[in-house]
Every structure is written in structure tokens, then in C-alpha cells.
Amino acid sequence: MFELISKFNKLKFINNLQLLIILILVVVLFISLYLGISLGSFQISFFDYLFGNDSKLQQRVFEEIRLPRVFLAGIVGASLALSGASLQGLFRNPLADPGLIGVSAGAALGATLVIVLGSSWVPSYIFGPFILPLSAIAGAAFVIYLLYLFTKGFGYSGITYMLLVGIAVNALASVGIGILTFISTDSELRGLTFWTMGSFGAANWLLVLPAYIFIIPAFIWLLNSARKLDLLQLGEPEAIRLGVDVRSLKFKVIITSAIVVGISVSLSGMIGFVGLVVPHLVRLIGGVNHNYLIPASIIFGSSIMIIADLLSRVLIQPAELPVGLLTSAIGAPFFLWLILRVKKT
Amino acid sequence: MDLKKKILFFIFVAELAADCEQAVDPTRVIVAGGSLTEIIFFLGEESVLTAVDITSNYPGSATSLPSIGYVRALSTEGILSLNPTLILGEEDMGPPLVVDQIKSTGIDLRVIEEDYSLNSIKNKIICVAKILGIEKKGDQIFHEKLNSTIIDLQALSLFNQNNLKKVLIILNMDGTSPIVAGKNTSANGFIEMMGAENAVTGFDGWKPVGAESIIQMNPDMVIITERGIRNFESIDEFIEKTSLGFTSAGKNGKIFALDGMKMLGFGPRSPDTALELAKIIN
């Protein structure tokens, strides 16, 4: 770890203040983790658990319900923030977010298919409870394939073209969701509505562990492109002249975004604004270089989502406030304030 | 403006007064609402049915009738094109604009009252029979087929009330926290019919509730719609793979999957379903 830090320092891609901010964010993450796992409608103290002072039931609720849920919230927050940060870098557009390239919508379409049509068309002994996330991932993968096809391997005609393709893909997926909504029954409609507002309620280790296994390598893969994203800010031709393989960079950023967002959406539904707002916040406090921005976004996105989920669990007990409502309700006004502030200065 | 208010008031009063008087011409009937279709079949009057909505899926032969779409999203033209002489709807029939448009054409449209109680099932059956002009036959069929069930259920319900058990009804849990019935729902009425109490207190309508809160409520019986467990091989797998196993219901094997309409439709099948469950809750 220290070697890594000094390496970063030598290369001057990240400064000491930024390192300090990242350290503080790590502390914040641990505090949110602690709060997330110790608070909830079921009375469980983390220390009681640690020292084995709790009842059998408390122990199992802690291990099988609360822990996976907090960990899922953490990884989803990290994924959305990372994807927002890297897409904003890639498109050189501060408004880019995971929804933009249509991947979230693709995942949502896949999930909607299962909620409305059920899973009678696949043998349940193969997939069982995995069918909804798998179908969502298939939806996300299909969108990625479409993007890939239309942009000739992400290398074609620049960024605007890709944004337009993303918009069209989004519209297509919305039509699919619309049709499914139209043919759904009362009870499916309710499930659908709540799913689109986001929830970590379906978390269990069987779903959360595979998510970590796929998402963490994607994080690492993207982290070492941070410097290239910096260079890309000079413009595509300049980046190419400076030796950046822009085509492969695009490929890398889009594929990783698609994977992490696809998995996140599939496990938690639609959660807005985290991908957009967190990178902006992180830039505001520490700077714009991606060697700082990407890890800081991951850590901060993670803590924000854990806290948002905690609030969603406890605010209106015993009912649960959909977490996507919370993030958007807090994120949108904050974003407006941010815009106002930037305009003034 | 004043005139508009008057018209609105008139419509409002007309709606309240939508009573059970015999219809002038109950020969081409369109039904919007699954429980009413069930009642017409129950009364043996299915020959008058011209079309039904898509919530009318029982008995099976109802689904072969022309469909007018979803009960809350009806279309004026679609319904009028079937040339009905009488339209019967549940309270959630809509949208209101369509209902008003149909009424303004002078077609006899009745909204049958519902308060999710055992009484309202009986009232609905008698009311539909009256409207169809077969009050006597309806009364007879009711006493033959349903009265004893209702009397048994009432007795059992009184007995169960001495030892109130908590029941939780789940709509589904596809990718979210379980969506459960709070107060002021059909499910709440169904639970009261059994002589039990809703495990959920504190909110109205159907809302998602976290797994931890459900364990805290610790229901003695959990009922989920069959749709809600369709992604699982069996009810046992469902109990094993969800956190419901931690509740009293899970430990005592009192988790059941039932057809939604059979339970929450408040048609002629609901008392039977409630009776079966009321027998085993204690």
C-alpha cells in the first residue's frame, strides 16, 4: 500500500491533499458501514454480535439479512459512482451518467420481462431465484452489444454518435417496458412500480457474493486507465497524439460500466442520481484528475448508498421507503444548488 | 362553473344511489371486476354475459368471453361497440372519465359497493341477483351453496378472536422487499374474516416491508399469492430461501401460497378459502 502511494506521488498523478481526502473518505465509509450494520428495525448490536452475546435469531438475522443488504448497497453505490465518473470522463460531458448509454434501461427491460411474464419459460431448477438478476444482466448485455454493433466496436465517428445511439436504445427499451407495463396485472404492476424505485430488499449472499466477484475486477481494470482518461480531456486527437489508444479506452470504459451497472440494476432496481452527483461532489472537494476521482468516487458512492439504504429501512418503519426515491429526492435539489453555485463564481 | 358543480354533484349523488334495483334489460351484460363475474357464474346466469374484463379469470370459461381490457383502464368506444344493455362494475372500475362517458349515453351502469367484509360478499351476491331480476333464485342459491360456509366461518372467526393470531399477506417479492398488505386493503378484510389480526400495523395500502421488520412482526401465518412464488420450485424452497423461515409461521409450517382472486377477490370463493385457513390457524 505504501509503495503504491509513493509510486502515485512520484508520478504526480495524485497529490497529498487528495490522498488525505481519500483517507478521510475511507474513514467515512467505515463509519457508514458501522451505522448500516448496527441500526435497523431489528435490535442487534454489532458488538454483541462480535462477542457472541446475542441470541441465535439475532445472529442469523444479522448474518443472513442485514450484512448482505449493507454489502449490496455498498457495492451498488460504488458501481454507479464509478460508472458515472468514468463515463463523464470518457464523454467529456459532466452530464453523463449510467442511464445515458442505455444500459440501465436494458437491464430494467430484462427485469421487467421476468416480473411481468414470470419465469415459467425457463426451468426453475436451473435458475430459481437468480432468474431476475440474470435476465436483467442479459438485457444490459444486449444493449452493450447493440452499442458495440452500431459504433463498430466503439471506435466509430466520435462521442456524439455514441450518445445518439444511447438515446435511441433508451427509447427502445422504454417502449419494451411500456408494453410490458400495459399487459401486466394489478399485482405485477405494484411489483414493477416498486422495483423501478429501487430496493436492496432482495439481497442475500447467493446474489451479493457473485456481484462482488464480477464487480471488483472491473473496478481494478478501470482504475489503471485513470491517467488515460486525464489525457482524453485534452480532446480525442490530442490524446491519440499523446499515445492513448482511444478506441480501446472507450471499449474498456463502456464495457466495465455496462457490467457494473448491469449487475447493480439487476440486484437493486433503478437508483437515480448517485452516478451523476457523487463524481461532481468528489471533484468539488478534491480535483478533477482521474487517479483521485475514480477511487474517491467508488468509496464515497459506497458510503452514500449505505446511508441511503439505512434511511430507507428506518425512516417509515415498518414500511420501507424505496431507496431510489431517497437518492433522487436528496440528489436533485443538491445538484440544482451546485449548478447555481458554479454559475455565481 | 355553477352548472359544472351541479352536474358534478348530480353525478356524485347518482353514484351513491347506484342501488340494486332491477335493471330494465339485463340481457347483454358487461362486467368489469373478477368477483362480479364469479357471482354471475355462481348464480348460473352466465348466459347474459357479453364481455368481461381481464381480472375475470374464474371460472375458466369466463376467459373465453370477449375482453374489455383492464378494469381500471377501460375504453368507452370498446365497451359501447359491444352494445351492452347493462354494465356492472366493482368500485375500482375506471378511469372515471370513461365511466362518466358511458353513463352519459344512458346505458345502465352500476357500481357495486364493497367494503371487504363477509357481509359485503353476501350483499354483492344479493344485489347482483336483484339487478338481474332473479332475487328469489339468487337467495335460494345463496342459501344452498354458501350460507352454511358463512355461518361456520362466523362461528370459527368468533372463536379465533379469543386467541388473536397475526397474519401477514404478501403480494409478491420479485427483486424488492416483500410487498405486504397494510390496513384498508382487501387482504386486511380477508384476515379479519378469519378472526385473526393483520401482522402489519402502521400503514395503509400495499407497501414494501424489509425482511427484518417482518421477522420483528413475527406473524403466526403467512399467505403469499401463487404468482409471488412462481420463481421458486415449491413453497418449501420458498421458505428455505427467504427470510420468512425465521418467523413463527415459518417454524410451524404455516406459510401458504394461494390464488389471489380466490382469497382477495371477495367473490363466492373467498368465504371457503377463509374458512379453510381459519380452521388451521390455531
Image: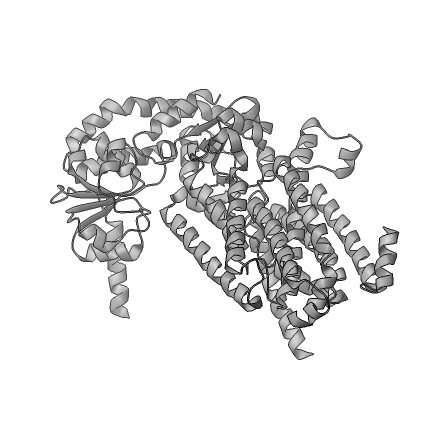
Residue A129 appears in the rendering: yes
| A201 left or right, relative to A58 | left
Q: Quadrant of the C terminus of chain A?
A: bottom right
Front-most of A209 and A217? A217
| A20 left or right, relative to A290 | right
- x, y percentage for residue A52? 78, 30
- x, y percentage for residue B109? 21, 49
Front-most of B16 and A107? A107
| B19 left or right, relative to B196 | left
Residue B220 appears in the rendering: no
- x, y percentage for residue A26? 78, 52
Give the total number of marks visible in the rendering. Answer: 0
Q: Which residue is at 45% across, 24% downward?
A: B160
- Position of residue B263 relative to residue A109, above or below, is above
Q: Quadrant of residue B36?
A: top left
- Position of residue B55 relative to residue B239, above or below, is below
- Position of residue A230 relative to residue B79, above or below, is below
- Position of residue A106 relative to residue B7, above or below, is above
Front-most of B180 and B229? B229
- x, y percentage for residue A128? 52, 32
Q: Which residue is at 17% across, 33% downward?
A: B45
**Color encoding of the figure:** one colour
Front-most of B238 and A292? A292
Q: Quadrant of residue A288?
A: bottom right
Q: Quadrant of residue B249?
A: top right
| B16 left or right, relative to B178 | left
